[in-house]
Image (cartoon, grey):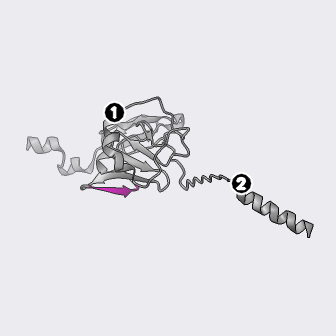
């Protein structure tokens, strides 16, 4: 019986003492992109001043104005297809906890105008080396050479001769009179 009295008294005392508990849960499902700034892995949104858009880390989507409405897309609009996400400045929105970062767009656009550069930023990952139609790999040296500056660009079909020199091969058009010089002279 004494044990039961102690339990009842203990329960009553624990209820009488005011308790405070604060639970904070931060669930960040997304992984920051490789072009994201170092040191902000808990941020959900970045504002990109140069393109006046937001990036949602959680959903891996860009948020920008299109046709008078805010849209969520996996890519920036076509007009920014050459925008360098690694080199562009990212304003990290640490304090924002909602789902519509554009609610304060006018304030952000005023504070962080196009071309804004704050403190120097490093990207999480390294900028990938991309090869496109104007570039090629230069043999074993593993360095990219721009074909526009190559002495061989625009010289027609090339063939390696046995001595290792390059000789231009005449097209079948020359024999058929398809050469521009022959057309002008006729």
Q: Does residue 73 belong to the magenta stretch? A: yes
Element at badge 1? Answer: loop
Residue 37 marker? none
Q: CA distance from mark 2 to mark 1?
A: 56 Å
In the rendered structure, the answer to whether residue 180 lies left or right of residue 6 reads left
Quadrant in which the N terminus appears: bottom right
Residue that lies at the very extreme toward the left in this rendered image: 186
Residue that lies at the very extreme toward the right in this rendered image: 2
Count of marks, rendered view: 2
Element at badge 2? Answer: loop
The stretch of residues the image draws in magenta is: 69-74
In the rendered structure, the answer to whether residue 13 lies left or right of residue 63 reads right
Residue toward you, 26 or 62 = 26
Residue 97: give x, y in percent of width and height.
47, 50
For image coordinates 19% across by 52% down, the residue present is 176
Magenta: predominant secondary structure element? strand
Residue toward you, 59 or 28 = 28
Residue that lies at the very extreme toward the bottom in this rendered image: 1
For image coordinates 90% across by 66% down, the residue present is 3
Determine contact: label 2, label 1, CB under 8 Å: no
Residue 70: give x, y in percent of width and height.
32, 55
Whichever of callouts 2 and 1 sits on the residue coming sooner in the sequence is 2
For image coordinates 54% across by 36% down, the residue present is 140
In the rendered structure, the answer to whether residue 181 lies left or right of residue 124 reads left
Quadrant in which the C terminus appears: top left
Residue toward you, 141 or 131 = 131
Residue 48: give x, y in percent of width and height.
38, 42
Is residue 73 among the parts visible in the rendering? yes
Q: Does residue 105 belong to the magenta stretch? A: no
User: Within 10 Å of the Cα at label 2, are there few (<14), some (14-19), or many (20+) other Cα atoms?
Assistant: few
From the image, tell me which residue sits under label 1.
115
From the image, tell me which residue sits under label 2.
17
């Amino acid at each position: 019986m004494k044990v039961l009295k102690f339990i009842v008294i203990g329960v009553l005392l624990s209820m009488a003492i005011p308790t405070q508990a604060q639970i904070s849960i931060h669930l960040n499902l997304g992984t920051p992109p490789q072009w994201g700034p170092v040191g902000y892995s808990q941020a959900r949104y970045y504002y990109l001043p140069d393109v006046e858009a937001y990036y949602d880390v959680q959903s891996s989507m860009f948020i920008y104005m299109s046709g008078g409405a805010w849209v969520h897309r996996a890519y920036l609009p076509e007009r920014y297809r050459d925008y360098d996400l690694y080199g562009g400045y990212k304003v990290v929105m640490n304090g924002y906890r909602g789902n519509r970062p554009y609610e304060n767009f006018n304030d952000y656009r005023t504070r962080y105008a196009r071309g804004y550069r704050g403190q120097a930023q490093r990207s999480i990952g390294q900028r990938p080396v991309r090869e496109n139609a104007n570039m090629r790999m230069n043999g074993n040296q593993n360095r990219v050479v721009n074909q526009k500056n190559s002495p061989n660009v625009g010289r027609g079909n090339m063939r390696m001769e046995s001595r290792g020199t390059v000789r231009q091969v005449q097209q079948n058009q020359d024999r058929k009179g398809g050469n521009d010089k022959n057309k002008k002279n006729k």
